[in-house]
Image (cartoon, grey):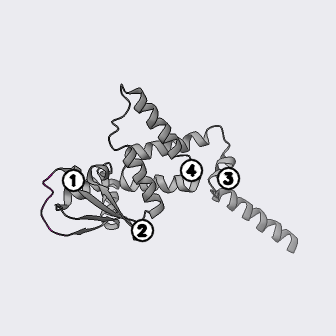
Amino acid sequence: MSLSFLHMLFIFITCSVFLASSNPITTNPDDHVVTLTSSGGEQFNVKLHVALQSETIKQVIMDGGFNDENIILSFPNITSEIMVKVLEYCNKHEYYAGPGNNITADDEMKMFDAQFVNVHYGTLFKLYLAANDLKIRSLSDLIAETIGNMMLGKTPNKIRQMFNIKDSCIDHYEQEESDLENARTRE
């Protein structure tokens, strides 16, 4: 099995989809609302064209034959707090096509993005995981770049401290030294 197949299988298993009827969407997508459910059961109504920034949601909708009335998608790995942040990002980026001739819009988006990722490390990682689950490439790229910039010029030890990462090699080495020291004191 390929990795992409396993990833898609994971998405379809963790993404519960409920349908109200079987008529496909036929009218203007701007008129439609998608309901996203977080791990805590909180529901968020989102304009379809905003939700379609997520490749995961887009694929589920394209494969699902959804109706005009109700599209409800459940994301059990994304908390309400993180879903709110992801939707804040998607709403802001709703019509932004990327860098172009409109300097004011570009500067405004850069300022928004800089403020958006100015959060605690733990929140940043949860946002990154959610962006990957939802396949929102622009958000994943923004967070990856931010994390990379945070690590620039820092020692591996400082990075481990910063992100609360335990080094299993060092822990194992320290445990062996401790065991040797204990063995020597018993002799």
Which is more N-terminal, label 4 or label 3?
A: 4
Which of disc 2 and disc 4 is earlier in sequence?
Answer: 2
**Which three-letter amino acid code belongs to the residue tagged 1?**
Asp
From what the image shows, is residue 15 above or below residue 93? below
**If you read the primary sequence from the N terminus, does the residue marked by circle 1 or circle 4 appear first?**
1
Identify which amino acid the numbered label 3 is placed on.
Gln
Q: Which residue does the image show at 20% across and 55% down from the upper left?
A: 62
- Which of the two residues, 117 or 64, is positioned nearer the viewer here? 117
Q: Which mark is residue 144?
A: none
Residue receiving disc 1: 31
Residue 155 appears left or right of 184: left
Q: Secondary structure at mark 2?
A: loop
Q: What whole-number distance in Å separates the C-alpha atoms at marks 3 and 2? A: 29 Å
Instruction: Indicate which disc residue 119 carries.
Output: 4
Q: Nearer the viewer, residue 52 or 106?
A: 106
Q: Which mark is residue 161?
A: 3
> Where does the image place residue 77, in percent across and percent down from the top left?
42, 64
Q: Which mark is residue 39?
A: 2
Please tell me whether residue 52 belongs to the stretch shown in magenta. Answer: no
Determine crowd level at label 4: few under 14, some 14-19, many 20+ residues with C-alpha closer than 10 A.
few
**Marks 3, 4: nearer the viewer:** 4
* 3D distance between C-alphas at marks 2 and 1: 26 Å
Q: Is residue 21 magenta?
A: yes
Looking at the picture, how far across and down is residue 169, in whole percent?
Answer: 65, 57
* Main secondary-structure element of the magenta-colored stretch: loop
Q: Nearer the viewer, mark 2 or mark 1?
A: 1
